[in-house]
Amino acid sequence: MTGGVARMTGTPGGSGLGLRLQGVTVRYGPVLAIEDVTIDLRAGEACGLVGMNGSGKSTLLKAVLGLVPLQSGSIEVLGGGVSPARRGGLLGYVPQLDDLDRDFPVAVADVVLMGRYHRMGWRRRPHPADRAAVDESLERVGLTSLAGRQIGRLSGGQRQRVLLARALAQEARVLLLDEPFTGVDAVSEAAVTAVLKELVADGCSVLLSTHDLAMLPDLCERSVLLHRQVLAQGRTADVVTPGNLARAFGLDLGGAR
Amino acid sequence: MSRWAPAVVHAAGWWDVLAEPWQFQFMQRALLVTLVAAVVCALLSCWLVLIGWSLMGDAVSHAVLPGVVLSYILGLPFAAGAFVFGIGAVALIGTVRQTTRLKEDAVIGVVFTTVFAVGIVLVSVTPSQIDLSHILFGNVLGASDADIVQVLALGAVALAVLVMLRRDFTIYAFDRVQAHVLGLPVRRTGALLLGLLALTVVIALQAVGVVLAVAMLITPGATAYLLTDRIDRMLVVAPVLAAGCAVVGIWSSYLLDAASAGLVVVCQGLVFAVAYVVSRVRQARASRPV
């Protein structure tokens, strides 16, 4: 219902469109992971993706990234296809901390530089502009002093900021974040939130999944409540209500209890 | 005066012992082949260890056996048959892995032992002068001119590709999702790496044979990973250590009149043991309260 309203009021293919999902359904074999998800996200808008574990949040992000095939529906990034957006480096992704191999022998600055590989030639040799972008990105997340440190020797929050810096260096215009505040200390959470607000003010679209509701109203003007399907979406204050949350977080538990 | 003379003789004697093997052309050729194989294998091993593809190296090195035998039967360069079977094994493993719920180690185990067994059968029914032990354990002292040219040419190709595309291989090993998000050719990079694995096995075959090729494809990278936490340094440390082991192994094989391939790999194992002790000492120091 809310999805329908957003579709009618949005400007299809307009320049203000950041990310559009229409009727997206993803199936893992016999398991329906997400069903008929429709979300419109304008440029300069941050949207929280709220739901319990297994509600399909990560699947939805993976679907946008083209990591899992759609059974039906369509996805547009900045009014175009997902593949061209990826090749242009317009689509950024900050994975869950657990997805990162922290023992991998690379330094912080090396990881951030990887955000710019698509801009370099086939040998991926960095230009001075790439180095400058890395330095600037590290400064924005407050990690300049740790640029040479191996990524395993950082706290979880610092590693999260490294991943955000990589997306900054990439100069992505649509940014997806998977649980960016899980396992993150207060200092890093504040740093990440501040940078995300700057990005939104700068016209980026931000879609972040979370089950941490405390930070949501501050950062995300809009939210989507997901439980395989979209249960509710709209202004965060209207979506994150006790009644809605009971539906989103209580459906499976209700059966078990 | 007389006090010093024996010492001088002694020093000269040591120099002779060190230099003696390299006077012979077959020893120089053995060293050249082993050096090339060791360096290429060592570079590749850094990514194999980080990706978790060590078993894949084991599989490919064994799976080339029937290819080598068929090459001899058909009169082709051994590299041709070996490469085809190496790639074929990788493709077969990938297909079975993706179309069943079997875990990768089980698939690798089934495929490579079966293909290897086919090779054993082929050798046994081929009435010729194929020496199985040369294929299994290398025949670096008997390398022909054609063998050496083959190893040098393939080695140069593998080395050039590994060095020039090293950053693509590193992002592939570290974060395939990020590579995909940036629109980089993830699948192509993975396929290229496996192709290089097959190529490298072919190179190592001449030097150390099927069985010990896998050691050269794992040990140097594993050793370097214990010693440094920067991949750029691993990519220097691993080939340098492997080259050192090649020299020491070939030299000691002359001195001890023992199997050169075995000694090269034993040497790599000893260096790994030293690296292990070094890394444990470092860990102990790092965790000690200051």
Image (cartoon, coloured by chain):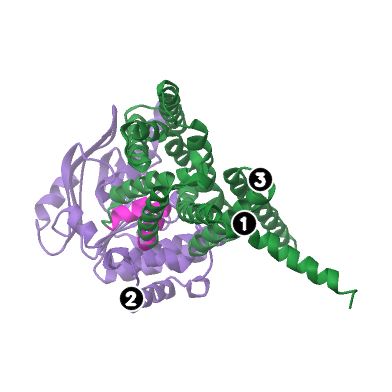
Residue B78: horizontal and vertical position, in percent? 37, 40
Segment colored magenta: B164-182
Q: Which residue is mark 1?
A: B21
User: Taking A200 as reference, is B125 left or right?
Assistant: right
Q: CA distance from mark 2 to mark 3?
A: 53 Å
Which residue is nearer to you in this view: A242 or B17? B17
Q: Which residue is mark 3?
A: B257
Q: CA distance from mark 2 to mark 1?
A: 48 Å
Task: Name the amino acid, label 3.
Answer: Asp
User: Taking A132 as reference, is B217 left or right?
Assistant: right
> What main secondary structure does the magenta stretch of the protein show?
helix
Which residue is nearer to you in this view: B213 or B73? B73
Task: Name the amino acid, label 1.
Answer: Pro
- Give the mark nearest the N terminus, 1 or 3: 1
Which structural element holds mark 3? loop
Which residue is nearer to you in this view: B34 or B185? B34
Subunit ID for the residue under disc 1: B
Pointers 2 and 3 in contact (C-beta within 8 Å): no
